[in-house]
C-alpha cells in the first residue's frame, strides 16, 4: 500500500485580472508552510499543485483543472499513493490536527456546503435545465474545497473531464453569463449525484469550517473571560473564504499564522 498524499492547490495565475482579484495570491505563501509542517508530522506526502496542464487559467480555471490534474501529476511523479486529499490553498490547518486519513474508507470524503443556502439553491436551479431537469437532492450538495479520494474515484474525475471539454461552451455560458454562481462546483455536484458516487458525509464537521466571520468563529467565550477564538479551540481546518473584500483573506491568514506559527515547529 502506498502513502497518503496531500494535493495542495497553490496555483498563482499569471493573468493580471486574477492576480489583482486574489491579492497577488500572497495568501498561498502563508498556507504552504502550515500544510508542509502537518504533512511531515503525519508522514503524508506534501504535493504542491503549482502548474496547470492548460496554461490559460482564465479560460480554464484552476478550480476545474485540479480535478483533471490530480491523479495525472501524482502518477507522473512516480508516487506510490493510497489516498489523496485535495485541499485549497486558502486554508490553514491547526498544528495538532489528527491525521484525517485514518478516518477514511472507500467512500469519497466531502463536506456539505451550508454557508449560503440561497447561493447554493440558485446555482442548482440555474443548471437544472442543462442537466435535463435532473432530480437534484439539495441536502446532498457538497463543497469542492476539501475532498479525499481513493483510486476508485479516478474514473469519476476522468468522466468529469470529458464532460467539461465536451460541453465547455455551454458550461462557460452558464457560468459567466446566466447563473454566475461558482465555477466547477455546480457541475461537479450534478455529476456526483447522477453517477451515484457514494460520499462519506458523516466526516467530523470540525475538519472543515468556512465563512469564519459569518458564523462567528472569531468570537470567544467572553462570559468565561476566555479570549481564545472558537475556531482555534474547537476546529481543525480553516477556510478563509466568503469575505466581501478578498484582500481580507491575506490579512486574516497572516494574523492567524503570526500568532500560531511557533506551534508548528
Image (spheres, rainbow, N blue to C red):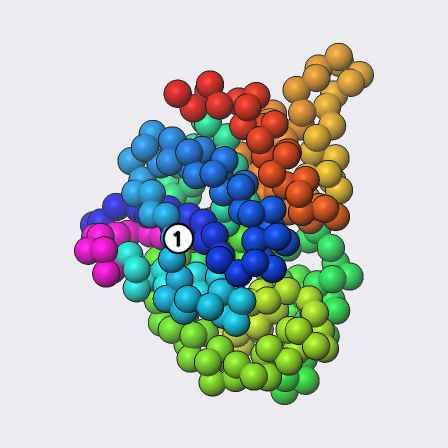
* Residue depicted at 50% across the width and 35% down the height: 30
Element type where label 1 sits in the image: loop
Residue 241 in magenta? no
The outermost residue toward the top is 225
- Residue 76 highlighted magenta (yes or no): yes
To which residue does mark 1 refer?
A: 50
Quadrant in the picture for the C terminus: top left
The image shows residue 47 at horizontal and vertical percentages of 33, 47
Relative to 27, 221 lies left or right = right
Q: Residue furthest right?
A: 223
At a point 73% along the width and 66% down the height, the residue shown is 121
Q: Position of residue 261 (x, y in %)?
A: 48, 23
Looking at the picture, tell me which residue is in the foreground, 238 or 110: 238
**What's drawn in magenta, residue-wise?**
75-87
Foreground residue, 129 or 162?
A: 162
Q: Look at the picture and state if 179 lies above or below 65.
A: below
Residue 41 in view in this figure: yes
Query: For this view, does 223 lie left or right of residue 228?
Result: right
Q: Provide residue 225's location: percent of width, then percent of height.
A: 75, 12
Residue 174, placed above or below residue 14:
below
Say few, some or many: other residues with alpha carbon within 10 Å of mark 1 (under 14 / 14 to 19 / 20 or more): few
User: Residue at coordinates 28% horizontally, 52% vertically from top-left?
Assistant: 82
Left or right: residue 75 versus residue 154 is left
Q: Residue furthest front?
A: 16
Above-or-below relation of 141 to 129: above
- The answer to whether residue 189 is visible is no
- On screen, residue 14 versus residue 21, left or right, reads left
Coordinates of residue 263 in the picture (x, y in percent):
46, 20
Height in image: 26 above or below 59?
Answer: above
Which residue is drawn at the image coordinates 28% and 56% (left, top)? 74
Amino acid at each position: 500500500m502506498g502513502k497518503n498524499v496531500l494535493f495542495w492547490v497553490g496555483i498563482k495565475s499569471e493573468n493580471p485580472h486574477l492576480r489583482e482579484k486574489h491579492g497577488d495570491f500572497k495568501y498561498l505563501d502563508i498556507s504552504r508552510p502550515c500544510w508542509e509542517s502537518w504533512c511531515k508530522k503525519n508522514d503524508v506526502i506534501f504535493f504542491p499543485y503549482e502548474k496547470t496542464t492548460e496554461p490559460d487559467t482564465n479560460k480554464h480555471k484552476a478550480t476545474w483543472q485540479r480535478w483533471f490534474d490530480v491523479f495525472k501529476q501524482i502518477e507522473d511523479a512516480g508516487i506510490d499513493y493510497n489516498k489523496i486529499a485535495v485541499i485549497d490553498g486558502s486554508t490553514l490547518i491547526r498544528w495538532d490536527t489528527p491525521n484525517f486519513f485514518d478516518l477514511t474508507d472507500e467512500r469519497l470524503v466531502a463536506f456539505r456546503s451550508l454557508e449560503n443556502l440561497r447561493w447554493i439553491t440558485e446555482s442548482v436551479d440555474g443548471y437544472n435545465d442543462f442537466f435535463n431537469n435532473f432530480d437534484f437532492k439539495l441536502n446532498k450538495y457538497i463543497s469542492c474545497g476539501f475532498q479525499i479520494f481513493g483510486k476508485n474515484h479516478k474514473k469519476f474525475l476522468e468522466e468529469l473531464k470529458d464532460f467539461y471539454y465536451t460541453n465547455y461552451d455551454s458550461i462557460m455560458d452558464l457560468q459567466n453569463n446566466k447563473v454566475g454562481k461558482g465555477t466547477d462546483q455546480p457541475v461537479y455536484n450534478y455529476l456526483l449525484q447522477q453517477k451515484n458516487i457514494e460520499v462519506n458525509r458523516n466526516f467530523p464537521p470540525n475538519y472543515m469550517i468556512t465563512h469564519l466571520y459569518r458564523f462567528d468563529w472569531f468570537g470567544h467565550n467572553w462570559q468565561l473571560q476566555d479570549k481564545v477564538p472558537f475556531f482555534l479551540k474547537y476546529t481543525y481546518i480553516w477556510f478563509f473564504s466568503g469575505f466581501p473584500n478578498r484582500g481580507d483573506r491575506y490579512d486574516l491568514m497572516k494574523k492567524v499564522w503570526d500568532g500560531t506559527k511557533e506551534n508548528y515547529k
